[in-house]
Amino acid sequence: MLNVSGTIREKFPQKKIVVIGDLVADQFLQGTIARVSREAPVFILRHDETETLPGGAANAAVNVAALGGQVLLVGIVGADSNGAVLLEKLYDSKVNCEFVITSEDFQTTTKVRVLAGQHYAPRQQVIRIDYENQTTIGTEFQDTLKKNLVSAVENADALIVSDYNYGVANRFIVNLANKLAAEKNIPMLADSRFNLQNFQGSTTATPNQEEVEQILGANFTETDCAELCRNLSFEALLVTRGNKGMLLIEKNKAPLQLEAVGAKEPLDVTGAGDTVIAAYALGLASGLNFAQAANLANHAGGIVVMKKGTASVAAAELLASLAKVEKGEHKTQTTL
């Protein structure tokens, strides 16, 4: 039996992960503060550069590829400039996009983060501007998404549904995803911004603390999480808690607390949940148990929050982080 490091090196490249969900173009507009405007008491920002990166479900797919896995992406982009750049970035990241729909009736959801600073000073986010698709995902889109999902899952080892509340991960898609995962006996993992309770019957989910609070209220307990896991018929629930680490609730087992890996103060949490679910899915697909896969996800999350912007984690970085545990440079997980 391979150890965890051996699993990453030898099994991750053999695993095929399907990601379906809302595809987002994450744009980072960077500029230098030049002066104060005479028109209003605001700074004038001299534009330096704009970078577009895969966000949402697209970022989860990029992270699977970066960790060495094979990934097939299912979703929709618009036949617009942001959609074209997004697809180009995905191809460059070795994400299979043959099941991505491109439509002139659809606008690529785009999140523009404006980063400002003076010369030679760190850039800070001052505002985010969201351009959201307003087109309803009607019958035609729905049927094509279902068809593409069925085809993509044919030889899959795990299925991720990434729900950013833009319409792709609706109840029809979630029901089909659960059905296909059950038929093929593969794990189905859910990441949902607002609709976790729609994913009843999935194998596991990775909500963050705020998302759990939306359901259970502030100051929820481990017992509350265990009840939520049971009510949603999950085999496990992995709650990410920022610099407090993670909480793994597994059916018929004691809760497991995983302490945060690395620095306690993150540099940028943008897209960290996508990295977590990618590592978690690859671990489960490779035969690791929930605790082992969650530990990998914890390390991956600790790495990515120290990177600026929407980022990914490479297999070599994950291996290096795990090696630090063996050397005693990282704290290890503890059972509650």
Image (cartoon, rainbow, N blue to C red):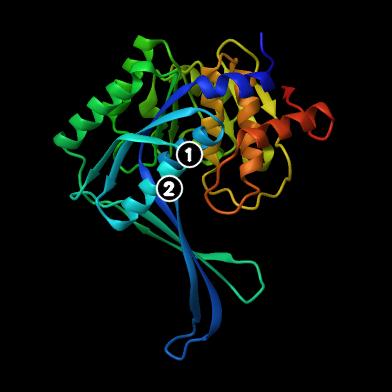
Whether 140 is drawn above or below 46: the answer is: above
Label 2 or label 1, whichever lies nearer to me, is 2
Q: Categorize mark 1 by other alpha carbons within 10 Å: few (<14), some (14-19), many (20+).
A: many
Q: Which residue is mark 2?
A: 89
* Residue 211 visible, this angle: yes
Query: As shown in the figure, which amino acid type bears the numbered disc 1?
Result: Val
Name which of mark 2 and mark 1 comes first in the sequence: 1
Q: Position of residue 334 (x, y in %)?
A: 75, 24
Q: Nearer the viewer, residue 182 or 222?
A: 182
> Relative to 71, is 275 on the left or the right?
right
Q: Position of residue 123 (x, y in %)?
A: 60, 66
Q: Categorize mark 2 by other alpha carbons within 10 Å: few (<14), some (14-19), many (20+).
A: some
Q: Position of residue 215 (x, y in %)?
A: 46, 34
Q: Which residue is mark 1?
A: 62
Q: Residue at x 71, y 37 (%)?
A: 261
The kind of secondary structure element at disc 2 is helix
Q: Quadrant of residue 335?
A: top right
